[in-house]
Amino acid sequence: MKITVVSKPKDEFKTILFPIEKEDQLANVLSQLAENTNFPAEELINDFKADHGEVQVIYSQAGKLILLGLGKNPGFAEVFKAFRSFSFKWKEKLQSRLCLNLLYVNASSNAALWGEAAVNGLILGGYDAGHYKTDQKKLHPIEKTDAELVVLIKNSGKKIAEQIAKGRSFANTQKEIFHLVNAPGNKKLPGDLANWAIQSGKKHGFKVRVLNKKQISENELDALLAVNRGSEHPPVFIIMEYTPADSDSLPSVGLVGKGVTFDTGGLSIKPSGNMHFMKSDMGGAAAVFGAVEMAAKLKLPIRLTGIVPATDNCVGSKSVKPGDVINSYSGKSIEVIDTDAEGRLILADGLSYMVKNYKPDILIDLATLTGSAVRTLGYEAGAIFSNNDELAAKLYDISIQTGERVWRLPLWDAYRNEIKSDVADVKNFSGKPVAGAISAAKFLEFFTEKHPSWVHLDIAGVAFGDSEFTTQKSATGFGVRLLTEFIGQLVMSEK
Ligand code: BES
Ligand code: ZN
Ligand code: ZN
């Protein structure tokens, strides 16, 4: 789709989109709009309240005006969501040539940010989850070759055009991430994750190294190997490095993502009711992929390393058994009480490998780690854990702005007892039905080598959720925005 940003329209449009905020002056805004576009205001003011997601169509001689309600005080997240949902639901009715009119944005709101959010949402709304359907797909109008979007904004200029391009760039990466997370377990083997990273690295300019099973074994990434024992598909250990030119003095960030391509639970097998959702157990890995790709695309001033240990967690005659004691990359021994607590095992190796070999200034891991995080925060927020108050606060702020919300849970040492093992250095499950997300975080902490700036995000409830795209749960892309904005603001905030 061709996108242009202008302050005066050059030609007529058959379809114009007007995002409208619910504000005290709404009647005035609507009157003005009516006056400028030649239709009577009275009924419109009566009918349209600008509630979030509300759509009002006005048909005129010139074409179709679509008013999209954003609700009160909309920020990035609200604009993005309204447009994504609108774009998806209206795909049959939209033209491929659209005008997005941001001239009626309240002066106190940030029109450029709205533009970015709107474009991000519009394009992402073109996502189609029916990847394996055999009938011919209908393209979303904005995906057609002649598609064109003209953004009308008061002070158009290079900076605003760049910000709007950023919205498109995010949408494209998020679509890829949706596709990865939604892919079924039989079409998404660990090697496929590696290939995705290699392709992305080639395209966007970052280095990718993939350790195969033999190399994983030589490197003694034994916890990853243990989880993989029940599988017929070899594990991979993916390492991505994005380093911009002249980056020596830039801060470094290490991201580690759980890449369990399917989680049956292993011998501690899961009930079958919701097991199919466990194709999304690589949502942490997907967030890391997306953030590394975005950092490279936006050329962010940061040294970034992404690590994804990937395997499926299956049942087989060689599967690790409850009670087994395994080794790990760190050299510490682990008693596996429950083979369904596999994410923390592969992350243990990912985290200690990252700290030992890359020593990042900031260490962040993401994982669809526990049902406990889902029970605690539901589907509205991920759980954040950190030993660094400043980092936790910063991520919280960005999470509210982006709509990828996180809420902090404690890492007090009082919880350390939960994972003390009688026979090994640590055990992977307390055996109790309480504080599961916290004890999982305490387990991970054990493998961070006392890193002073560590963040753990348990995204079990938010990586896969309800949306307009599917009847069942599907990928949300959670983390891509959050991490990219966080990384992007690091250097700015240091200055
Ligand atoms: N992948 C699951 C966690 C999960 C649950 C993700 C629901 C998304 C939605 C994880 O590997 C797991 O099975 N965790 C167990 C740990 C327990 C056995 C200690 C859990 O939370 O029940
Ligand atoms: Zn599990
Ligand atoms: Zn899992």
Image (spheres, rainbow, N blue to C red):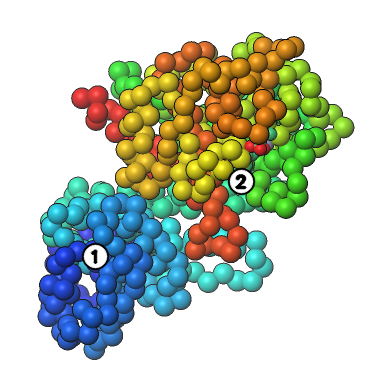
Question: CA gap, disc 1 to disc 2?
Answer: 36 Å
Residue type at mark 2 is: Ser
Mark whose residue sits in front, 1 or 2: 1
Name the residue tied to disc 1.
22
Beta carbon at label 2 within 8 Å of ligand 1: yes
The residue positioned 15% from the left and 71% from the top of the image is 29
The residue positioned 38% from the left and 58% from the top of the image is 81
Image position, residue 168 (x, y; %) = 36, 53
Image position, residue 474 (x, y; %) = 56, 54
Q: In the rendered view, does 24 fall on the left or right side of 450?
A: left
Q: In the rendered view, does 219 fall on the left or right side of 2?
A: right
* Nearest to N terminus: mark 1 or mark 2: 1
Q: Is residue 444 visible?
A: no
Furthest-bottom residue in view?
Answer: 61
Name the residue tied to disc 2.
280
The residue positioned 36% from the left and 36% from the top of the image is 396
163 up-or-down from 387: above or below = below
Furthest-right residue in view?
Answer: 317
In this view, the residue in front, 334 or 236, is 334
Q: Which mark is on residue 117?
A: none
In this view, the residue in front, 62 or 457, is 457
**Total numbered badges shown on the rendered structure:** 2
